[in-house]
Amino acid sequence: MPHLDPDLVRRVVRDALAEDGAFYDVTTLATVPAEQRGRGVFLAKGDGVLAGLPLAEAAFAAVDPWIRLTPLLADGTKLERGAHIASVEGALAGILSAERVALNFLQRLSGVATLTRQLVDAVEGLDVRIVDTRKTTPGLRALERYAVQVGGGHNHRFNLEDGVLIKDNHLAAGRARGQSLAQVVAAARAGVPHTLRIEVEVTSYAEAQEAVEAGADIILLDNMDPAEMARCVQMIGGRALTEASGGVTLANVRAIAESGVDIISSGALTHSAPALDISLEVETA
Amino acid sequence: MPHLDPDLVRRVVRDALAEDGAFYDVTTLATVPAEQRGRGVFLAKGDGVLAGLPLAEAAFAAVDPWIRLTPLLADGTKLERGAHIASVEGALAGILSAERVALNFLQRLSGVATLTRQLVDAVEGLDVRIVDTRKTTPGLRALERYAVQVGGGHNHRFNLEDGVLIKDNHLAAGRARGQSLAQVVAAARAGVPHTLRIEVEVTSYAEAQEAVEAGADIILLDNMDPAEMARCVQMIGGRALTEASGGVTLANVRAIAESGVDIISSGALTHSAPALDISLEVETA
Amino acid sequence: MPHLDPDLVRRVVRDALAEDGAFYDVTTLATVPAEQRGRGVFLAKGDGVLAGLPLAEAAFAAVDPWIRLTPLLADGTKLERGAHIASVEGALAGILSAERVALNFLQRLSGVATLTRQLVDAVEGLDVRIVDTRKTTPGLRALERYAVQVGGGHNHRFNLEDGVLIKDNHLAAGRARGQSLAQVVAAARAGVPHTLRIEVEVTSYAEAQEAVEAGADIILLDNMDPAEMARCVQMIGGRALTEASGGVTLANVRAIAESGVDIISSGALTHSAPALDISLEVETA
Amino acid sequence: MPHLDPDLVRRVVRDALAEDGAFYDVTTLATVPAEQRGRGVFLAKGDGVLAGLPLAEAAFAAVDPWIRLTPLLADGTKLERGAHIASVEGALAGILSAERVALNFLQRLSGVATLTRQLVDAVEGLDVRIVDTRKTTPGLRALERYAVQVGGGHNHRFNLEDGVLIKDNHLAAGRARGQSLAQVVAAARAGVPHTLRIEVEVTSYAEAQEAVEAGADIILLDNMDPAEMARCVQMIGGRALTEASGGVTLANVRAIAESGVDIISSGALTHSAPALDISLEVETA
Amino acid sequence: MPHLDPDLVRRVVRDALAEDGAFYDVTTLATVPAEQRGRGVFLAKGDGVLAGLPLAEAAFAAVDPWIRLTPLLADGTKLERGAHIASVEGALAGILSAERVALNFLQRLSGVATLTRQLVDAVEGLDVRIVDTRKTTPGLRALERYAVQVGGGHNHRFNLEDGVLIKDNHLAAGRARGQSLAQVVAAARAGVPHTLRIEVEVTSYAEAQEAVEAGADIILLDNMDPAEMARCVQMIGGRALTEASGGVTLANVRAIAESGVDIISSGALTHSAPALDISLEVETA
Amino acid sequence: MPHLDPDLVRRVVRDALAEDGAFYDVTTLATVPAEQRGRGVFLAKGDGVLAGLPLAEAAFAAVDPWIRLTPLLADGTKLERGAHIASVEGALAGILSAERVALNFLQRLSGVATLTRQLVDAVEGLDVRIVDTRKTTPGLRALERYAVQVGGGHNHRFNLEDGVLIKDNHLAAGRARGQSLAQVVAAARAGVPHTLRIEVEVTSYAEAQEAVEAGADIILLDNMDPAEMARCVQMIGGRALTEASGGVTLANVRAIAESGVDIISSGALTHSAPALDISLEVETA
């Protein structure tokens, strides 16, 4: 099961509740007595993949440790409209004050997991990874990385510090100083920990050839059509991993995968996944 | 011009850069010498409204205070595809390390401003406010509130602490304890600062009547069709402000506005605005 | 019962203990063995209203989670000299190390609650709220807001972000730009969330008239004598709430209230309430 | 001149401004344009000693680095009613948003300095220090320590970590374990850094004798009348410093000082100093 | 038993785990299932004094609150090679992820305790304290202060704020302004809380004489040979405490102590103590 | 030149100064007037490699932004005893208050760089990297990683999150569940980003063979003698990188390198490098 650091969850949820004023919800404080109890059920209002229950649970716990969220389904479950996701029970005031933050996380992360799962399902049977990118929501990358895994995807490097990707601008910078692609690759190799692979972004067959001969461990084929990708994959012949990137959609992902690439990365997984509609139906006692 | 606290900008940008490992970008450190200079231009790749330049500027300044971003357009400008938004100049390494974070903010906030502007334009000539909701990205509410203003919209209460909204669940909680809507409104009035208006969410004409008679300052007409809204507005007759909410789209917003409501709130402004495509074209020296 | 965010309590108490070096109390560490137990009773040394027990409880818990504070009275209770407020029992070392911080909070907040209660009692039978201001102790506003409620008072806006108050300087700034009071009120109305009332500070009958005609929701009558206030209240005739401010004392508060104003605000509640004398009598085992 | 860490000033002022919502002052944002300029003068509305100008300066700088505060007098100056303390000039919006926080610090710290100076002046010509205690405002101890110095006083230990004071409860704890006062003093001596003096609180002549014979470096004479203090001082004969504590007032401080004690400590300096009335008179351009 | 603030322990351990990426240990997450259990024993691989068990315990608890560390020996115990220090049991994944941080603290602090104990043992029977200095690891001073106590040593002032030490440069600064040593001592006396002793660093017999006559409470004899120290101690004759400093080694510490000084301070305790070799032997279930 | 994030430097230095009480240095505040100026020179008292000047510079700047440190040599320079490293000039008080923290960083980091350089020089002419480990000082890993680079070394993975190392315990855990080494490697490959190499720790020739056949990218030869390493390297034949670890000393590092391994890692670089002796000689004006 994908991993979420519980402490990170607590911290990000607490910050979101503070941003939402949930620790001093004037309406609820004035209209709902502390002793009134309530019960709610999270319902799917659309089809998708569930992700984010630990955040919902943490939201209620942060406003009132005695509120109990009981998962009826687990993160990763395929939801159909109407599915009962979890129930929550305890002091009604706390339930109402934390509801919005719980839903904001659930809907967003389930949206990411849902889109990921659609892409993963679309390439079923092919030996390819669907991975995310750095086009994530500022502040929420670790959560979105988790949602991608929940949807059956894999992660790319987490950030600029823990992975190497020589992009067009790095190559252009080298050329401006008279360096060949091979020299830039060698500089990267010399400068980074030996535990990291060297990935190079290329935009043409010729450049792909140059990169693989320079010893790149991974070749990122940027914005090529599937046919050209296939030619590159064949030429590379297993000497490097291949990653496809740029303009990946549900419509074209299988064609891209059939080019034989090892990895397909999609920024849309995190910057454009529509939220999954989920609601909390509350009953007051 | 809408206001952004510069210190908040610095903090949120710095956190985003840290999350992205931008202060130790292994690829750039290994392949781009500190003294190499570069220049880039932000280009619109679609039509929309610009929002977020102060964040882009702060991103470069945080990695290298000598990098200079020069705005060519201001937040709030309507962009056409191809528009030159801003130029950035300085050490190439810093430009490359901060690029992604700058774009992540620009694209997201411009997306919010663009969608807001579309709704605002759709109700042109009518005396109605387009406002946001609490369905924002956790951690980014203040920025999204700003983007809504940049797009010509207004803000709803910022959070649970600084505004009163008696929702169905608060009313149901009261009913469960034998309280009428009027009693719940009175409890809210008694319990909150006199500086806050009392807003009540209603779902029917009858309930709207009850709310206005209870002295509510604002009546939120939830998920009604425009015709029913118009009846409510007429019945209320200026005794309270009226707000429409639920299922607002570009297609129906004008019809809703023509019902005579004072405010239209839309969660989609912040939870479903597609990112505006913006790129940074870099030239290395 | 007034609400205090437990997490805020823990944080502010922990900071106060750190400031006081209570986590490394050299005298107690050197002279009191960890296993020695003690017992203490908080005693009122004057008459007043109790406020702040949750902070005292949190202070002991922060230095030693096994120390048990047992409230004998609740916040809001009227104390007479000699009253036993709470007992505390556990490791003596922790009791001694946390004592000062517990007392510093209890004495200060009980002082605020006591003064508030005196003003509230002085206007008994009249339909008027006693409210606080922004003249609070830096860092302790949320606690002092709580103490005012404990004493029977209400709160004004919490801060500049969540309430509107157009003061003399805002009006003067408008006049300097050729704007009338009505224009300034309109600008405020246009620029702030619809959930906030517009309050205007006035210093004369004429200005009050101007403000109410400009549609102000609340008129702050600043530094008027009760007779003039009464004339203003009559003229306003329920078209706006009225708030009295400036030089409120125990001696004049009832006269002010009898002018018919809805709200009386007093900075003295928080900037000049004398601490209530409370001591901790310790017995060692 | 007493020392204030500039970074602490910035931090505490920034926190106070955030608490006050000064970075998003809705009234001012809506009614005062960014380009309108203003000018203000801080005026003393009572007699006293000025303290806290660096905090006022930091408050304006935090909301707008271009606002310029020009001190007309320095911290420590004796003020008479009507004195012009400082002028402030720049964007009016920022001046209005920071005004309250600036005043809250100035009034409180000047209050502490004023009361301290009164006690110091009352013992003029005698060789005695007026010192503060740990009965300070939570979160503001370093500022209040500064204000005491500004008023001509000295500081006691800052907190439990950096000074030794064996109080009645420590002695009682020792007695409960069969330890004499001398044994408790010896335990303290053995357990704390050699850089700290050992102070012992006593309540009688006999106990003072016991303490000095036990080698205490400082004897705290608690709640004695001046005559008994004088007897103790004579008996001690310079073998230890002597500190008077308990019930110190302007009325009795000289009598206490004439007993010959070296130090007089007063909790009232920080827990009961009335705020000095200071206002900011603003002119708009 | 020496005291460690449990909250400080939690904080410093959590920071160390975050620095080590222990909350997202990619290797362990990918290869060890959450339900697999393990057991480990901490073994001494050399002779020394144990210090730091609370930090090891906190490290495992921070990654998984259900992992149980059972001390088999207590901090302060003299270890022989092969000694079983503690066992740890629970989810294997957490044990592996926290292992390195636990060991990094244990080895370093046991190293400090071990070296301290060697110096303390070397002066056995003499009335002298072995104390630390400010030459500690940035960020870890409170832990190293603890380890020194665990090894039988005492602490010097914790930092510049809580102790007075007039060093050669302070004296030189005074001389440059025409002040004598006595005048510098007097200035210090006048400027610091009366709870602090005044310590003066001297480098010659003459200067020691000057310092004691100026009323210094402690004389730091810097870099003298034992014979000269003995002369100084005799001259001082109990009028001040004496501290030896500079070049203290296991070889010369007893000779230094026999000079009669009260305190011997050693920077090497914290800047040069070799880590004690400790390992964790894990068995998987 | 190795990279240090300036913001990290500021933060860690500020924390160290706060820990040392440098912002309220009672001795210096009492004895050195603010206007007295001073000048100091950092001198090497031993041979080594300089590292840490940016931290020294930041230390002075943090206490007084007008103090100017002028580097006379750069980080990475080989120092001989007596070398003048840098001069510092400005207010004497600030120089004295920041001196210890500046030295603590300089001495420690120069120690790491010095030991690294010794190992690097010892393998001169051979194609091998000297790299660090995770046995670093808690809180200072990024600084020590920098010092290793300054000394001519390279870095291993920074932490558990950004590199894969399957250790004996991971393999044992797999075996306990019936998994072969190849299966554990496959699980790691499947679970981590494709940007990371898979490194496997082995303790025998047979295990090395198994690892390379399982497709490991890097083989860590743990605690083997050089001859066995050479056999492993030959058998691996370039199919994987090889890393030697365990018991690396100046005496044996060349022999190890001559076995043909690509990388030699040494925990001693960071856990046992003796501090380089550096002093600050101050002249007062």
Image (cartoon, coloured by chain):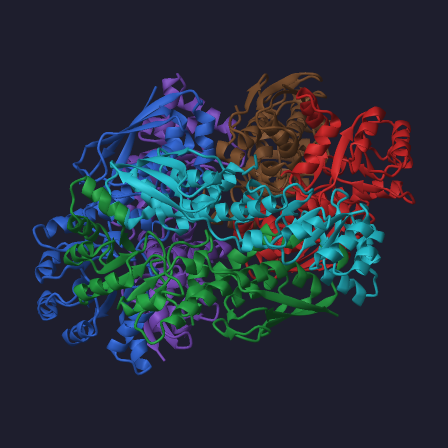
Chain colours: A cyan, B green, C blue, D purple, E brown, F red
Q: Which corner quadrant of the image does residue C58 belong to?
A: top left
Residue E106 % position (x, y):
63, 28
Query: Does any portion of residue F93 appear in the rendered image?
Result: no
Answer with the quarter of the image where residue B125 lies.
bottom left
Q: Residue at x 63, y 61 (%)?
A: B99
Which quadrant: the N terminus of chain A?
top right
Image coordinates for residue D76, horizontal then vertical, percent: 39, 61
Image quarter where the C terminus of chain A lies is top left
Point 68% across, 68% down: residue? B282
Q: Is residue D48 left or right of residue E11?
A: left
Left or right for E234, reference A186:
left
Q: Quadrant of residue B45?
A: bottom right
**Viewer-nearest residue: D98 or B222:** B222
Q: Is residue D174 visible?
A: yes
> Percent position (x, y) of residue E42?
65, 21
In terms of depth relative to the viewer, which is nearer, F170 or F190?
F190
Q: Is residue B195 left or right of residue C129?
A: right
What is the total number of numbered labels drawn onto the structure image? Answer: 0
Image location of residue F74, percent across then percent down: 77, 56
Q: Nearer the viewer, residue B109 or D132?
A: B109
